[in-house]
Amino acid sequence: MEKQSERRREAEPKVFDRELEKLWQSIDGEKKRYATLPRVLKFNDVPWTQGAQAFHKYYIGPGPQWRLKQFPLFSMAVVEQLIPPGGKSGRHRHFMEALFYIMDGEGYEVHDNVKYPWEAGDVMMVPTYCVHQHFSTGNATARLFFNIPSVFEHLGIASIEQMELHPNYEIPPGAKAIRDASGTMVGYKTTEGMEIRFGFNQDLQKVMDEKKETGLSGKAKETSYDYYIKTLKEQTEFRLNVPHVIRAKDRPWENTRMGKIKYLVHPSTPSALLVYDCFVQEIPPGGKSGKHRHASEEVHKILDGKGYDIQDGVKWEWAKEDVVAIPTNVTHQHFNADPPGF
Ligand SMILES: [Fe+2]
Ligand SMILES: [Fe+2]
């Protein structure tokens, strides 16, 4: 037996596999390149664009084409959305979960036919594979700042099922509408020949409906496989049944080592999402936050005032409405630039 395996080893060709080393090098290279990107994006430097859901500002959009272009974040898309008074977004569904901070306005959500009201200062969460639509009911345009984790792209499940377009939607210049027998637009074809189709993905719907019906075996003794199925079912039900809106007025301010913070989404509170924390922080004139670092990426929307970050010894100035990125493992601290007593 011993001799056999020795002979087998001798017969094996010597192949020097350096793929893993190449991967490590390319990741290190990307980290160095993204460290050169600006940590602050100015609100007015990012244009509004029209999409199927609403009007958007992409600080960093979903998909690999955005990587290392204008904002040094790997793990999330960072977007802002407008919904006019009395208006609504496009109705759609995707596996990506999403965290929304309501900047302005008031309105409500419909998530799988359930209504959730929101107003400025609240956080709203769309769990995975949930049909959702935003409705603006106030006199002012509703503005929603939101994050989508990029992990869904890497898993290959980042597609969208579009059931309804937002009311002001226009197809791209030169594109041709595709209509069904009744004349309803069901998609369009761009001048480059790309075909976009709206509506439910019937095959996917069937799979997900069957998944919902999957139950336990009914046997007296639960196997590990039964336990696994049960846990998946419980997790899905939990995320659909917890509140999808967290009201700012219901959450307490706390004085912490990082400063005066109000956690809106925190591991200790039930949440429809798996990946995000979310908090609001107040820094007094002349004041500063604590200084720390962490492996997770962080993004800040500046709600008021002006100041700056020191990130790994480099100063980045920001003001109201700007967006600030904090890459992984960067030591950071926030400063209010107004003088004390301002
Ligand atoms: Fe969405
Ligand atoms: Fe931080």
Image (cartoon, grey):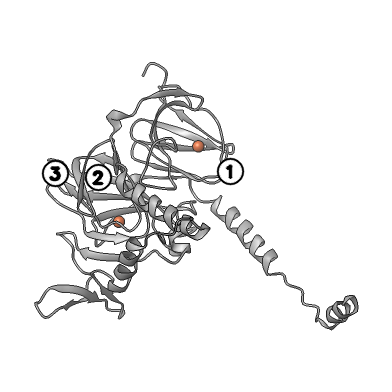
Q: Residues within 10 Å of mark 2 (few under 14, many from 20)?
A: many
Residue at point 31%, 77% (across, down) = 194
Q: Position of residue 29 (x, y in %)?
A: 62, 58
Quadrant position of residue 102:
top left
Element at label 1? loop
Q: CA distance from mark 3 to mark 1?
A: 41 Å
x, y percent for residue 183: 10, 76
- Determine which residue is flagged by label 1: 329
Give the Cα separation between the discs numbered 1 and 2.
31 Å
In this view, the residue farthest toward the right is 3
Q: Pointer 3: what residue?
A: 137
Q: Which residue is mark 2?
A: 143
- Residue closest to the far front: 220
**SS at circle 3:** loop
Q: Please name the amino acid that badge 2 sits on.
A: Arg
Q: Is residue 56 left or right of residue 6?
A: left
User: Quarter holding the N terminus?
Assistant: bottom right
Circle 3 residues within 10 Å: few <14, some 14–19, many ≥20: many
Mark 3 Cβ and ligand 1 under 8 Å apart: no
